[in-house]
Image: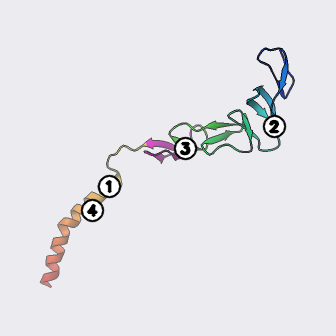
Amino acid sequence: MSCPEKTFSSIANTECEDCTSDCKKCDSAFNCLECNLPLWTFVNYGICKASCDEKDFFKWNDNKCYECTSPCTKCADFKGCVGCKDGYHLESGKCVEHDGGITILGIFFVIFMAISALILPCLVRLAYKM
């Protein structure tokens, strides 16, 4: 059964039922596929909203919100994370798991401390001789 805009075919496929008032096209009373378009109205998990949720991003070509892929907590698109869940850090737009290993900064700190431990006693002896 083919139904006009703003309606959908009932489960029994015998009549057309109304979509919600903010919905232009739906496949059930609870799943909007396309919103009436006052500017900036998006489909977000079957519901028309003024904006996407924080963990989602907006895709212009189909006017819908999509969930960021895990482990992103915020994203600009399917590929570009701007926030990561705990245990991950952002690296070139991707969330990378912390490996628990030593970082470059950690290596420099260890080298600095080792050199300081060797040089400091010499400096103290030199200061006492003066």
In the image, residue 77 lies at what x, y percent?
61, 40
Residue positioned 60% across, 43% down in the render = 55
Q: Which kind of residue does numbered mark 3 sit on?
A: Thr
Q: Which kind of residue does numbered mark 4 sit on?
A: Phe
Looking at the rendering, which quadrant does residue 110 occupy? bottom left
Mark 4, residue position: 112
Q: Is residue 130 above or below residue 7?
A: below
**Quarter of the image with the C terminus in it:** bottom left
Rounded to the nearest whole Å, what is the CA distance between mark 2 and mark 1? 55 Å
Depth check, front residue: 108 or 21 = 21
Mark 3, residue position: 73
Mark 1 and mark 4 lie on one chain; the one further toward the N terminus is: 1
Residue 94 magenta-highlighted: yes
Rounded to the nearest whole Å, what is the CA distance between mark 3 and mark 4? 36 Å
Looking at the rendering, which quadrant does residue 112 occupy? bottom left
Report if the CB atoms under discs 2 and 1 are less than 8 Å apart.
no
Mark 1, residue position: 106
Depth check, front residue: 70 or 114 = 70
Q: Is residue 7 above or below residue 117?
A: above
Mark 2 and mark 3 lie on one chain; the one further toward the N terminus is: 2
Q: Which kind of residue does numbered mark 1 sit on?
A: Gly
- Front label number (2 vs 3): 2
Q: What stretch of residues is rendered in magenta? A: 79-96
Rounded to the nearest whole Å, what is the CA distance between mark 3 and mark 1? 27 Å
Please tell me whether the stretch drawn in magenta is mainly helix, strand or loop. strand
The answer to whether 25 appears left or right of 107 in the picture is right
- Helix or strand or loop: what does disc 4 sit on? helix
Q: Which kind of residue does numbered mark 2 sit on?
A: Asp
- Helix or strand or loop: what does disc 1 sit on? helix
